[in-house]
């Protein structure tokens, strides 16, 4: 920051601590270059890098073809129709603040999931809930166990709150539950696990989850982030909510950003014991979930037809992409989510850039330590076909 000051205005402290460039001492004026000191943790944060928005790619590359975004694991079928209808009914009420406690939405969730409303929290996306967990519980130096790679927000939250990140390498693109359990000690505050993992799409199954939860002591919070859970129809996926009554230290996170197609509204929700939920409620800002988002999310919860249609689209897309990726000689990690981690024999950045020029936005995962891979969202049949055409040309 550059500030013009009269030299005589400066206190002794400022004269000693700030860098200043004298302009003209005869005029008694100088320019002070204030270096505003950041907290140490902030200096080291590498900010979250979202998938490129379509408008940005169109603007930068001047593309006239329809641009397809397969970068952020959004629902390619659009928003839940029930949610859209409900939103339009409420537009005329946006002069009012939203319900601070999300009463109606929590009531719906309570009915759907068989939980008390005191065991539910709603946030501006599940990323807000991740932040609240760290904000409420992490003291500088507390150990936070997570897989490496796993959803990048865990690492960022850890840096923001000064946690000591204990990164457990994946084993063949999957969580290494034994290593995670072994890393827990008296300094551990949180174990945070995405199931499925973003960016690999693998899951921990029922038995492995049981194994893990049995080993997490009561003083450690176990966060299971199930952002993609609705895509998984397989019986092997753990029923984490069933463990809540016996494990007061368990937090389960869900979101409306993925299968419900409401990423732009920012609604995530979490379940836990009343103690944890009330702690998280204390550290959130008021009105953290907007009025339209609350109404849309409540309506989306009833949209079983849309959820089913989205699961079907995802399953069909997955089959098509597996077959076509194999045909063109590309390796991939089989997924439980709505995205496929695709592997190349060289750095994937050029492939990403070429695909982008052709109007297909994918996602590099360099910051996840995977420079030779791209994370690609499963699209509509037409989008998947275009993706394969482009990959065929450039690989
Ligand atoms: C594992 C995981 N958790 C959470 C999120 C963020 O979800 P939200 O949009 O609810 O903040 C994502 C988004 O990509 C994710 O992959």
Image: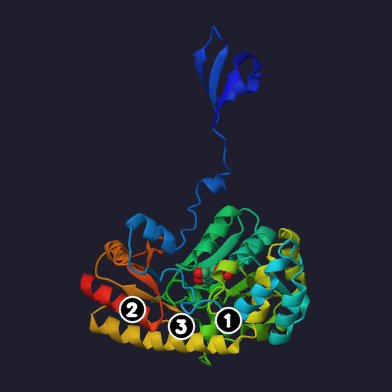
Gap between marks 2 and 1 measured at Cα: 32 Å
List the residue tagged with mark 3: 336
Q: Mark number for residue 332?
A: 2
Are there few (<14), some (14-19), or many (20+) residues within 10 Å of tag 3?
many
Quadrant position of the N terminus in the picture: top right
List the residue tagged with mark 1: 81
Image coords of residue 350 (percent x, y):
27, 62
Left or right of 259, for residue 350? left
**Cβ of disc 2 within 8 Å of ligand 1?**
no
Residue found at the very far top of the displayed protein: 26
Q: Which residue is drawn at 71% across and 64% down?
A: 94
Left or right of 63, for residue 203? right
Are there few (<14), some (14-19), or many (20+) residues within 10 Å of tag 1?
some
Image coords of residue 278 (percent x, y):
77, 67
Q: Residue at x 36, y 69 (%)?
A: 66
For the residue labelled by badge 2, is the local secondary structure a helix, a strand or a loop? strand
N-term-proximal mark, 3 vs 1: 1
Question: Closer to the observer: label 2 or label 1?
Answer: 1
Are there few (<14), some (14-19), or many (20+) residues within 10 Å of tag 2?
some
Q: Observer-nearest residue: 35 or 147?
A: 35
> Where is residue 80, by image quadrant?
bottom right
For the residue labelled by badge 1, is the local secondary structure a helix, a strand or a loop? helix
Q: Observer-nearest residue: 270 or 73?
A: 73
């Amino acid at each position: 920051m550059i500030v013009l000051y009269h030299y005589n205005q400066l206190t002794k402290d400022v004269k000693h601590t700030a860098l200043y460039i004298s302009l003209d001492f005869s005029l008694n004026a100088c320019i002070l270059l204030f270096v505003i000191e950041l907290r140490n943790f902030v200096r080291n944060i590498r900010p979250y890098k979202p998938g490129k928005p379509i408008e940005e790619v169109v603007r930068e590359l001047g593309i006239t073809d329809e641009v397809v975004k397969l970068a952020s694991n959004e629902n390619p079928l659009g928003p839940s129709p029930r949610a859209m209808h409900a939103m339009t009914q409420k537009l005329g009420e946006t002069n009012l603040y939203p319900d601070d406690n999300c009463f109606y939405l929590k009531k719906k969730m309570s009915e759907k999931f068989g939980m008390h409303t005191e065991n539910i929290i709603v946030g501006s996306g599940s990323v807000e809930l991740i932040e609240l967990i760290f904000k409420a519980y992490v003291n500088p130096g507390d150990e936070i166990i997570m897989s490496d790679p796993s959803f990048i927000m865990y690492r960022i939250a850890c840096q923001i709150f000064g946690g000591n990140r204990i990164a457990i390498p994946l084993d063949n693109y999957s969580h290494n539950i034994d290593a995670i359990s072994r890393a827990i000690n008296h300094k551990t505050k949180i174990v945070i696990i995405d199931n499925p993992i973003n960016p690999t799409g693998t899951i921990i199954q029922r038995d492995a989850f049981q194994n893990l939860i049995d080993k997490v002591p009561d003083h450690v919070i176990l966060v299971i982030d199930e952002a993609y859970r609705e895509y998984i129809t397989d019986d092997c996926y753990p029923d984490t909510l069933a463990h809540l009554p016996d494990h007061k230290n368990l937090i389960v996170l869900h979101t409306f950003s993925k299968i419900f197609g409401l990423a732009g509204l920012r609604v995530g929700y979490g379940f836990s014991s009343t103690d944890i939920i009330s702690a998280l409620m204390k550290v959130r800002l008021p009105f953290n979930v907007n009025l339209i988002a609350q109404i849309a999310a409540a309506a989306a919860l009833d949209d079983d037809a849309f959820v089913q249609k989205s699961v079907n689209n995802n399953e069909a897309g997955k089959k098509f992409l597996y077959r076509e990726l194999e045909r063109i000689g590309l390796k991939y990690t089989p997924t439980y989510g709505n995205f496929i981690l695709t592997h190349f024999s060289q750095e994937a950045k050029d492939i990403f850039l070429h695909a982008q020029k052709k109007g297909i936005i994918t996602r590099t995962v360099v910051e996840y330590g995977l420079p030779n891979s791209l994370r690609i969202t499963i699209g509509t049949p037409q989008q998947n076909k275009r993706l394969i055409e482009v990959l065929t040309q450039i690989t």
